[in-house]
Amino acid sequence: MKYDKNGALLECSLPGVPCKSGKVRDVFDFGDSLLMVVTDRISAFDVILPSGVPGKGRVLNSLSLFWMEFLGVPNHLLTADPAEYPAAAKPFAADLEGRSMLVKKVPMLPVECIARGYLTGSGWKEYREKGTVNGQKLREGYENASRLDEVLFTPTTKAEIGDHDEAIDYAAVEKLVGAGTAKLLKDATVGLYSRAAEHAAKRGIIIADTKFEFGLAQDGSLVLADEVLTPDSSRFWPVASYATGKNPPSLDKQFVRDWLDESGFNRQPPGPVLPDDVIAKTREIYFKAYADLSGRSLD
């Protein structure tokens, strides 16, 4: 295991087990199952930063587990108990505890399924320029951070590390996965977002948007996979500080993105080392997101 000076887990290793590293997760292949280990790495603008955020992996893993339980739809989880992991992983149980899960290996669909309940980010930029979001025409009169009249399904491609996801329209999704599966993806994305947003609102949090990923079961039904409604894959806005016309304060990695922009980062690798105070504030934001949404504490 590789940790940085602040105790952030940057890299996980299981000798003899094939591994594929993503921006944040190290995924180990055990044949018919995968061990997903959530490191403390942080990425922004598709660039993996050299600094980690201690405990961030525990937040992402724990929040995904919370939402899988809450939503109650078919998902890829087998167990999050290291005592039940394959033998090769058990010597590293202390490092894996709280930041990993063993999942079923399912064929993943090549679409990032994004639900937008509020107009912000790249959606707001496109709306200002063209009056559309992902090519979907919207009415006039929206402001930045406005609640949309209806939840939008705004899918993107799934890019390799270092590349950027590209927005695609619904017709492109149908070409990629077929009309039947495209409808399943849209309905599931909007439905899961709406249920989660209703829960979050009761906890004082607005889910502005989020990303889901799905695999396919043998019978053609969807399997919820990867991370679920985490600060890495969502925009979380505290209700108390929400206002339209500007980007509301958020409980996600927008704080890091803003710092990078203010520092003059050109959004190309390599990324800069984050100052200790930025790391500490980011950690605080992630842990608060988990506590507010789940009603639980990791500390």
Image (cartoon, rainbow, N blue to C red):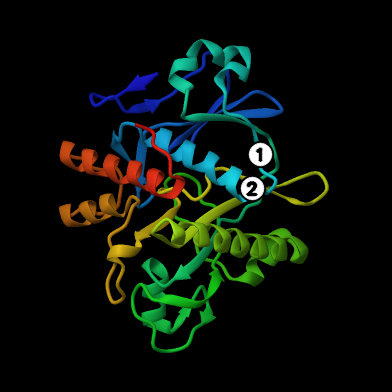
Q: Where is residue 163 in the image (x, y as percent from the top left)?
A: 44, 51
Disc 1 marks which residue? Answer: 76
Identified at 56% across, 30% down, the residue is 101
Residue 16 in view (yes/no): no
Q: Are marks 1 and 2 in contact (CB under 8 Å)?
A: yes
Amino acid at circle 1 = His
Cα–Cα span, label 1 and label 2: 6 Å
Q: How crowded is mark 1: few (under 14 residues within 10 Å), some or many (20 or more)?
A: many
Identified at 55% across, 20% down, the residue is 82
Above or below, comparing residue 180 to residue 93 in the picture = below
Mark earlier in primary sequence (1, 2)? 1
Q: In the drawing, does residue 72 fall left or right of residue 146?
A: right
Quarter occupied by the C terminus? top left
Determine whether the residue tagged by mark 1 lies in a helix, strand or loop.
loop
Above or below, comparing residue 124 to residue 193 in the picture = below
Amino acid at circle 2 = Leu
Residue 186 in view (yes/no): yes
Q: Quadrant of residue 85?
A: top right
Q: Which of 100 and 18 is in front in this view?
A: 100
Quarter occupied by the N terminus? top left
Q: Where is residue 179 in the image (x, y as percent from the top left)?
A: 75, 66
Disc 2 marks which residue? Answer: 224
Identified at 43% across, 19% down, the residue is 95
Extreme residue in the bottom direction: 140
Q: Nearer the viewer, residue 232 or 240?
A: 240
